[in-house]
Amino acid sequence: MGDTQDYFSRRAALIQEDKSLRRENYSLQSLTNNELAADKIVRHIRAEETVSVWGVEHDEVSHLFPGMEFLTSKRIIDQTKIFKIISKACAPTKMPKGALLHAHIDATVDKGYLLELALKEPFMHVRASCVITAANSTTAVPEFRAFKEVQPSQSASVTDLDYPADSWIPLHQARESFSLGGPDGFDKWALGAMVINPAEAYGTHNTVTKIWQKFQSTFRATAGLTMYRPIFRQFLRRFLMESIGDGISYMEPRINFFDKFMFDADGNETVPHREWLLDFGQAISEVRAALREQGREEVFVGAKFIYTTLRILSPEELEWYLEDCIALKQEFPDLIAGFDLVGDENVARPLIDYIEPLLAFKQRVKDLGLDLPLILHAGETLSDGGKADNNLYDALLLGTKRIGHGFSIVKHPKLMQLCREKGIALEVCPISNEILRLTTSIPMHPLPVMINQGVPVTLNSDDPSVFGAMGLSYDFYQVFVSSETTGLITLKQIALDSIEFSTLDTEEKARAASVWEKHWHEFVDDLVNNSGIAAD
Ligand SMILES: O=c1[nH]cnc2c1ncn2[C@@H]1O[C@H](CO)[C@@H](O)[C@H]1O
């Protein structure tokens, strides 16, 4: 008996020591009774649903398990109690998520809404690089462009046998005359090109290289819409409102400034970056005003762009963008959070190629006294020692404020130590990593390694409208159901860390955190009072 007791105390001590680096240990020390009760409730429901939802055969989907392929299981997730708690679809009190620190703005707004906006534009046109047939409609991608007036077209639609490849057709005409099912068929074709479906992710494109080809093409399909100023303005507002609607109070979306100009209302490609920022500032003010009218101003702390361009540039070409970023930061200090380079790290140029311009940038930023950090994508890869994995060394040596993804960092004990000690948070994007084939499910994701090693992490949606995972609730859900160690307090710490590791200043962070706390306690109290489940 004595031996057994001794064994149990040594066991408890070992577990405690093993978990001692987890950041939520700070939060655990000062929990309210309701937080403790709420944590028990959600753990109870999770355990119950592991059996009742994920442990049964399902009509449409077989081989269920928590944290499985998102695109196959989304409809099941939507029905779960845990998802309803995290997203609180119909209650006034939402789980507050904190900040969204990693999302590409052109992949954040619902594609159906984007198409709706396009259909309201009288001079929007569409084209394809070949005649669209039943055989190629799932692979041929539409492109959009607005002109200042209706363009003459030879064919009624892109499905006509005599359609001249790459010729523009007025959108409404092309849609009405689409011979593969009329307007509905057109919408199916266009929307299918803008998202990744389960057959692609888990069948036809089931490797990192292949899914990236499909993924990149979704951006080609929407560029003509998102990069048209009248639509751009509306989708910025929509992005802010939808994020707020999911309990996100502050956002640092990345915007791709690779194209130097956007298309203006007159169809000419003449809108420079500073005007994109004016539109962004305007969208923020309008959303703030609308919330103020509803007496809900406090749910929105603000938003800033992370300036990004593509890793296909030559180092010389990059210099223009770095200067552009500095000029924009000087003109709009509150709207620019930092600088980053994007694209598939496995095939694009590694950071080391840009070391000279990036070091020069850092010096310029310092000399000018600007608060303009690098916030770099690195390690979004399966490679071990390849160029994408090695980007982690450069990101850290370059003093990155956070790491975008950092998926492969668990292979690098020293780099994890650096992140832990210097407070460099990882912007983890679980659903993105799964759909882009870095992991086949969330239980296989390295997130628990990161958390157990005490590396600060935030959860992010990356490209929610390409994945059909709007907001942050789905990422929180997948993470929550994929670990038995993770509890409500882990999610609390992750949300608080998203504020802590944002580029808000100290005072703004304190304000954001205190509003967050208030909403968190409302959420927790609501959970305890209305869940119908006794806490013990
Ligand atoms: O997870 C990602 N890693 C790297 N680049 C990305 C990711 N998601 C989107 N983009 C890139 O950002 C641009 C759109 O703003 C696109 O070029 C897309 O490939």
Image (cartoon, rainbow, N blue to C red):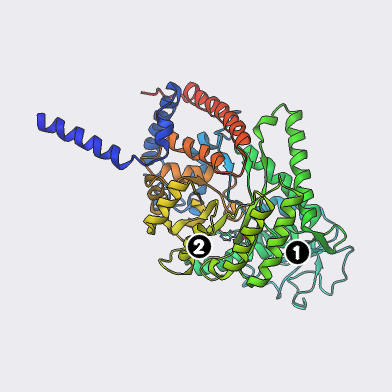
Q: Which of 345 and 351 is in front in this view?
A: 351
Residue found at x 62% / y 31%: 511
User: For disc 2, does the CB lie below 8 Å from ligand 1?
Assistant: no
Q: Is residue 88 visible?
A: yes
User: Around disc 1, counting alpha carbons within 10 Å, would you say few (fewer than 14), some (14 to 19), or many (20 or more)?
Assistant: few
Q: Looking at the rendering, in which quadrant would you find the C terminus?
A: top left
Q: Write down the quadrant of residue 274 in the picture.
A: bottom right
Q: Looking at the rendering, in which quadrant would you find the N terminus?
A: top left
Residue found at x 75% / y 59%: 227
Q: Name the residue under label 2.
A: 394
Q: Nearer the viewer, residue 447 or 379?
A: 379
Of the residues shown, which amino acid type is indicated by label 1?
Lys
- Furthest residue to the right? 149
Picture coordinates of residue 170, whole percent (x, y): 82, 64
User: For disc 1, does the CB lie below 8 Å from ligand 1?
Assistant: no
Q: Is mark 1 on a helix, strand or loop?
A: loop
Label 1 with label 2: CB-CB less than 8 Å: no
User: Around disc 2, counting alpha carbons within 10 Å, would you say few (fewer than 14), some (14 to 19), or many (20 or more)?
Assistant: some
Picture coordinates of residue 166, whole percent (x, y): 75, 74
Cα separation, mark 1 vs mark 2, equals: 27 Å
Of the residues shown, which amino acid type is indicated by label 2?
Asp
Q: Name the residue under label 1.
A: 260
Q: Is mark 2 on a helix, strand or loop?
A: helix
Q: Can residue 439 be seen in this view?
A: no
Relative placement, left or right, of 332 versus 40 is right
Q: Earlier in the sequence, mark 1 or mark 2?
A: 1
Picture coordinates of residue 267, whole percent (x, y): 85, 62
Picture coordinates of residue 48, whole percent (x, y): 38, 35
